[in-house]
Amino acid sequence: MQNIIRVENLTKKYEELIAVNDISFSVEKGDIFGFLGPNGAGKTTTVRMLTGVFPSDNGEIYLAGYNLKDNPFQAKQKIGVVPELANAYLDLTALENILFMANLYGLLGSKVEKKAEELLNTFNLEDRMNDKVKKFSKGMQQRVIICMALINDPEIIFLDEPTSGLDVESRRLIKNIILELNDKGKTIFLTTHNINEANSLCNKIAIINKGKIAAINTPENLKRTIKSSQSIRVSFDKDIAFKFKDWDVVNKVKKEGDKYRIYTDTPDELIFKLTNLARNHKTKIRSINTLDPSLEDVFIKLTGGDKT
Amino acid sequence: MRSRIIKLKLKQIFAIAKKNMKIYYFEPPVLIFGLLFPAFLFLAFYQGRQMPIDDLFPGLLGIIFFFGGSSVGPFIVPWETRTKTLERVLCAPISVSVLILGDIVGGFIFGVIFSSLILIIGMLFFEITIKSMVLLLLAIFISAFCFASLGTIFSALPTDKPSNVMMLSNLIRLPIIFISGVFVPINQLSSMAKLVAPLSPVTYVTDLMRYLLMQESYFSVTLNFTILSIFSIILFSLSVYFHRKTLLKRI
Ligand SMILES: Nc1ncnc2c1ncn2[C@@H]1O[C@H](COP(=O)(O)OP(=O)(O)OP(=O)(O)O)[C@@H](O)[C@H]1O
Ligand SMILES: [Mg+2]
């Protein structure tokens, strides 16, 4: 498959702070590529360089075959962007906002107006297209911003935390839109710190931490890389106050509601101990499952912190 | 390829100017500083003198052209930093100079419309004869461009508070008015004032108006136009220069 995004040795400093530190990766055409990392990892900084908002200090970026530095006009025509903290113009209508963007890509006339109306239609905004955006809810505004990113019919779509701050319904809508766009052959570059979102949407994930890429793979392969995070979830008929941590087969214990999640490298040995424990406390095991490492475990392991 | 990019740039300039017209022309601070401020300034001046009002017209027009042309520009970039619309624009295939030129054209059109309206109203109420309509239009155009460029320079102040920019712009615009000999013909200025007056572009606009309305001027018409053109080029270049320095710091 063709690499539609290629990044080589990308670096960005803010004075002393190295926000993005010599990263290289590529994205295949048709991927939904997740860029996952905790707050301050350098996700937005990377997106801003990839979308040409500001230049990198070092490194090369190729978008759909064009070098962003040498051919900025051609490269930028190929992309659509939903920035992290962007707004539509509140004093313009939804339609005016989209047409303004179209104009910036050199698109004028009735054909693009029709396309804008079609987009608004797909996003359930057709009744409100002549209303000023300041009257819109946050979810509606976000939909307008996505329409603005699609008007130039881009091959690659960058979305920087597109669902943060939205309710369940708007989130679901945006997820569906991402899947639909991908169905139509668009490549998606999705920045998020939401692990579930990355897990359910992306077919490739890069985990970024402190400006470095810690891992890059399919979600399933990422999970496989950390065997040691296998765990057992167990609950007992009556609560037994027991320090599981004292067993040397146990790596870590988390209480999850009325259940315990116990991390171990040797699940079978742990199960044996748990059954004995229940018998000694004159109680029964109500439920027990072994769990494979989740993407969250991978994330925590690689970023050395908690999920945000 | 080159001609395609030039065409794209023209479309972008036009699109940005159009957006600015829709959003900023009716913002209260633009109207206050573009319209009311020159009116107050004029009244304050007129109050204190026993002069025929006709003699004050050229200076009044100088002030109006100046404030009209430079009142939109200071707002746009700080406002768009604050409302977070700037980043989306920078994702498009656009260069800083085109973005700034779009803002200048927005201010320019405001200046032209505003100056023309005042002139038309003036002609309805007072007996004004204009020596040459063509020169008048040319003067309106060049001063609107010159002052719109100046207004856009102020907006390069890297802040997202339009009030900061407004403060800076008035701190600079008011002294410019005071050194420009707007209500006193240059030949009647003190020798000190005569030295500083040529530093202000408003001096040349007013002198042109004096020529067009009263058939007398201190500098020649050609010199006035030449110096205004030089001012325009310098102010436009400075505007692009400063914005190149500060625009990316705003993101
Ligand atoms: N304009 C700036 N000036 C100085 N430092 C900055 C600037 N923008 C970002 N940083 C710093 O660079 C680092 C990376 O920031 P970035 O915004 O790229 O992180 P992020 O992964 O997008 O985080 P989040 O999940 O919070 O959006 C952070 O430490 C941040 O404080
Ligand atoms: Mg971010």
Image: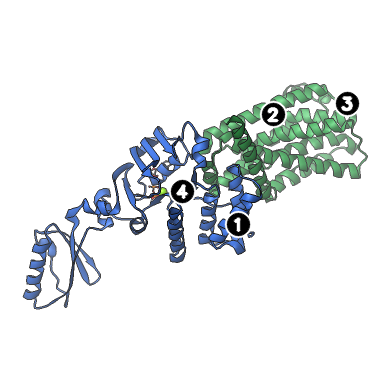
Of marks 1 and 2, the one in the foreground: 1
x then y, percent, for residue B236: 64, 30
Residue at mark 2? B232
Q: Can residue B50 be seen?
A: no
Query: Label 3 is placed on what type of residue?
Result: Glu
Q: What residue type is labelled 2?
A: Ser
Q: Nearer the viewer, mark 3 or mark 2?
A: 2
Residue drawn at x 74%, y 24% is: B227
Q: Pointer 1: what residue? A: A117
**Disc 1: which chain?**
A
Chain letter of disc 4 in the image: A
Q: Is residue A154 visible to the viewer in this orientation of the structure?
A: yes
Q: How is this picture coloured?
A: by chain
On screen, A137 above or below B149?
below
Q: What element carries label 3?
A: loop
Q: In percent of the image, x 62 and y 35: which residue is there?
A: B153
Quadrant of the image for the C terminus of chain A? bottom left
Between the residue at mark 1 and the residue at mark 2, the CA separation in whole angstroms equals 41 Å
Mark 4, residue position = A157
Q: Nearer the viewer, mark 4 or mark 2?
A: 4
Q: Distance between the residues labelled 4 and 2?
A: 40 Å
Left or right for A102, reference A44: right
Q: What element carries label 1?
A: helix
